[in-house]
């Protein structure tokens, strides 16, 4: 067992390879806290991940439409949280995935890492992440 200083879920393959990707798991309530009052704390995690060349992926245990509807324990509107998540996506190249429940989330993460392994580049400390940097991409569709 290893303690992570970024993200909640990472992977070590049987051959010892650790891809530079971590999922930041959030329940709906956690998301409303982290992306409103707790946003500065989350930004520090973003910067730690960038310093270590780790690709963060936010994964939220609720649907997109459920997020839009808001959270009964928060005065922040759902649309405000969605806008913040889109800002994080485009500004820091950190995508958000919405899963309807914990089971779907577990399947998504397992399938993600299985597929990523099949496309395995030469992962090593300091190597580029296997994701394009959307923050510097030219507008338009890929060629």
Image (tube, rainbow, N blue to C red):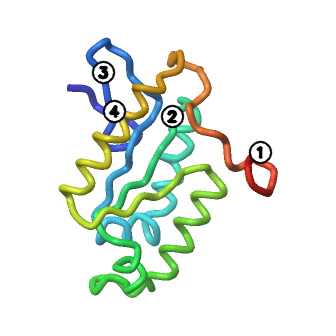
Q: Position of residue 51 (x, y in %)?
A: 58, 33
Residue underneath mark 1: 143
- Asked which secondary structure carries label 4, the reply is helix
Q: CA distance from mark 1 to mark 3?
A: 33 Å
Q: Residues within 10 Å of mark 3 (few under 14, many from 20)?
A: few
- Residue shown at 32%/41% (left/top)? 111
Q: CA distance from mark 2 to mark 4?
A: 18 Å
Q: CA distance from mark 2 to mark 1?
A: 26 Å
Q: Nearer the viewer, mark 1 or mark 4?
A: 1
Q: CA distance from mark 1 to mark 4?
A: 27 Å
Q: CA distance from mark 2 to mark 3?
A: 16 Å
- Give the vertical position of 4 relative to 28 (above or below): above
Residue closest to the eye, 126 or 37? 126
Which label number is shown at residue 54? 2
- Asked which secondary structure carries label 2, the reply is loop
Which label number is shown at residue 114? 4
């Amino acid at each position: 067992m290893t303690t992570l200083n970024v993200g909640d879920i990472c992977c070590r393959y049987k051959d010892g390879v650790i891809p530079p990707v971590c999922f930041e798991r959030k329940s709906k309530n956690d998301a409303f806290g982290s992306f409103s009052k707790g946003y500065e704390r989350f930004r520090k995690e973003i910067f730690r991940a960038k310093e270590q060349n780790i690709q963060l992926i936010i994964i939220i245990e609720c649907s997109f439409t459920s997020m839009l509807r808001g959270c009964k324990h928060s005065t922040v509107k759902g649309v405000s949280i969605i806008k913040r998540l889109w800002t994080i996506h485009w500004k820091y190249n950190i995508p958000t995935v919405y899963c309807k429940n914990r089971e779907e989330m577990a399947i998504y993460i397992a399938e993600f890492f299985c597929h990523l392994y099949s496309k395995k580049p030469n992962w090593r400390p300091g190597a580029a992440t296997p994701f394009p940097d959307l923050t510097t991409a030219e507008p338009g569709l890929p060629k």
